[in-house]
Amino acid sequence: MILVLLGPPGAGKGTQANLLTKQRSLVQLSTGDMLRAAVAAGTALGRKAGAIMERGELVPDDLVIGLIAERLDQGDAGQGYILDGFPRTIAQAEALDRLLVERGKQLDRVIEMKVDDDALVERITGRFACAHCGEGYHDPYKMPKVPGVCDRCGGTNFVRRKDDTEEVVRARLKAYHAQTEPLIGYYKAQGKLRGVDGMADIALVQKAINQALDPPEGAHKPPNSPG
Ligand code: ADP
Ligand code: ADP
Ligand code: ZN
């Protein structure tokens, strides 16, 4: 299964992608994570992308498309994947369609996660993650079960993203509305879009996504759909 999680910054894409990988044999492909790794490693791509990300703007399409194209050819993406944070522009969506056709695959579903802008600012400014394993948290919505200790790995150091300030979030939301929102119409026209209420609790959003992925018996399924 090939799945896109579409939604504004803070909608819960990373959180839900992580939960889905635990239930299905899918890998999570996050262009944000890949770009942050490139910045941390100081690669040529990272040097180009870093300043753009700090301003909350989108990294140029050709750079991000190149990153995804390379990633799709690594063996572990063969079973299926969840794209989290990609595509973010119509040009990226068109490139993804081409990349999949070239590989004899097709996109199965696009899940649009709907969350109000005010809630997004609260989500982003409360976000933090384990410095060791990257598990995501939120103050106050998803705190570690034992205060100060990561649920997944026991780590005790936590980090916040440099671009998770209110000012940069406003710029990221602007970029979302201008450049990414048009993808809703693009995927609606392809018949692949399903919307979920991203304002609900994490577990309820998870349930809604699973319902959108496994429609009831007898529902229309496109021919050649893998799984
Ligand atoms: P968010 O939590 O806002 O959804 P991400 O981790 O997905 O954040 O992305 C962080 C930043 O990385 C974005 O603000 C943007 O600068 C850059 N980025 C990530 N994915 C893309 C993409 N597909 N196209 C362009 N820029 C991207
Ligand atoms: P995205 O990847 O779309 O930017 P995240 O998954 O990182 O979003 O979620 C943003 C923040 O909001 C994180 O701190 C996360 O723990 C929290 N969060 C995610 N989903 C929910 C939810 N349904 N309700 C409350 N907080 C949430
Ligand atoms: Zn951890």
Image (cartoon, rainbow, N blue to C red):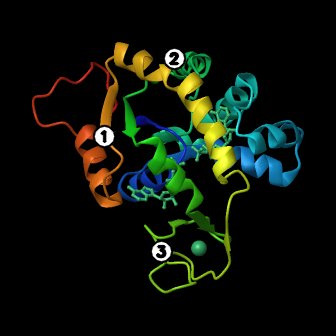
> Residue at the location (28% across, 39% down)?
213
- The amino acid beneath tag 2 is Val
Given contact means CB atoms under 8 Å apart, are the residues at marks 1 and 3 in contact? Answer: no
Q: Which residue is denoted by mark 2 in the rendering? A: 101
Which comes sooner in the sequence, label 1 or label 2? 2
Give neighbour class at mark 3: few <14, some 14-19, many 20+ (Cα, 10 Å).
some
In this rendering, would 169 be left or right of 106?
Answer: right
- In the rendered image, residue 83, in percent from the top left (x then y), is placed at 51, 38
Q: Residues within 10 Å of mark 2 (few under 14, many from 20)?
A: few
Q: Is residue 187 left or right of residue 204?
A: right
Q: Earlier in the sequence, mark 2 or mark 3?
A: 2
| Residue picked out by circle 1 | 196
**Structural distance between the alpha carbons of marks 1 and 3:** 24 Å
Q: Is residue 11 visible?
A: no
Residue ID at (35%, 49%): 199
Structural distance between the alpha carbons of marks 1 and 2: 27 Å
Residue 20 % position (x, y)? 39, 52
Quadrant in which residue 68 is drawn: top right
Give the image location of residue 214, x and y in percent: 23, 40
Answer above or below: position of 19 versus 195: below
Q: Residue furthest bottom?
A: 146
